[in-house]
Image (cartoon, grey):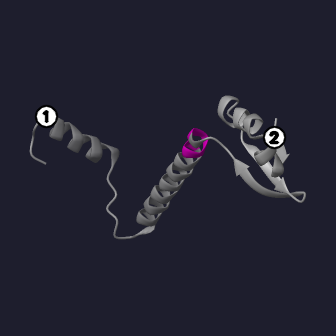
Amino acid sequence: MINIRPVSDLRNKYPEIENLVLKEDEAVYLTKNGYGSMVVMSLEKYSKLITDIEYEEYVENALEESEREARDPNTRNYSHEEVFGQLRRKLNGEEI
């Protein structure tokens, strides 16, 4: 359930909000004069959110880079046999 509270609850009902954030692991949305003002969440929840966003950006950037390389006419494409052949030779200690 989404918890929406007036910002005054942060001052007047801090223990209740703290319980929701820390023990119930829920974000609390605070309003000021009826409009959204801020969100309160635990450090753990915030850290996971930031980590997830950074990971998504990393994957997105890697995919964009691979698409650019695939479109580049100067990019050397290797067949399945070439890639796995090189890996097998490397694992067997052979020169490549």
Q: Nearer the viewer, residue 75 or 44?
A: 44
**What's the mark number on residue 3?**
2
The residue lying at 9 percent from left, 40 percent from top is: 94
Residue 5 lies within the magenta run: no
Q: Residues within 10 Å of mark 2 (few under 14, many from 20)?
A: few
Q: Is residue 82 above or below residue 33?
A: above
Q: Quadrant of the N terminus?
A: top right
Residue 70 on image: x %, y %: 43, 62
Q: Nearer the viewer, residue 94 or 49?
A: 49
Q: Is residue 35 left or right of residue 16?
A: right
**What's the mark number on residue 63?**
none
The residue lying at 21 percent from left, 44 percent from top is: 86
Q: Is residue 76 left or right of residue 32?
A: left
Q: Which residues are magenta?
A: 44-48
In the rendered structure, which disc, 2 or 1, sits on the residue that comes first in sequence? Answer: 2
Residue 80 on image: x %, y %: 34, 44
Q: CA distance from mark 2 to mark 1?
A: 59 Å
Q: Quick one: SS at disc 2?
A: strand
Residue that carries the numbered disc 1 in the rendered image: 92
* Secondary structure mostly seen in the magenta stretch: helix
Residue 27 on image: x %, y %: 72, 42
Q: Nearer the viewer, residue 13 or 87?
A: 13
In the orientation shown, which residue stands out farthest toward the right?
A: 34
In the orientation shown, which residue stands out farthest toward the front?
A: 12
In the orientation shown, which residue stands out farthest toward the top?
A: 23
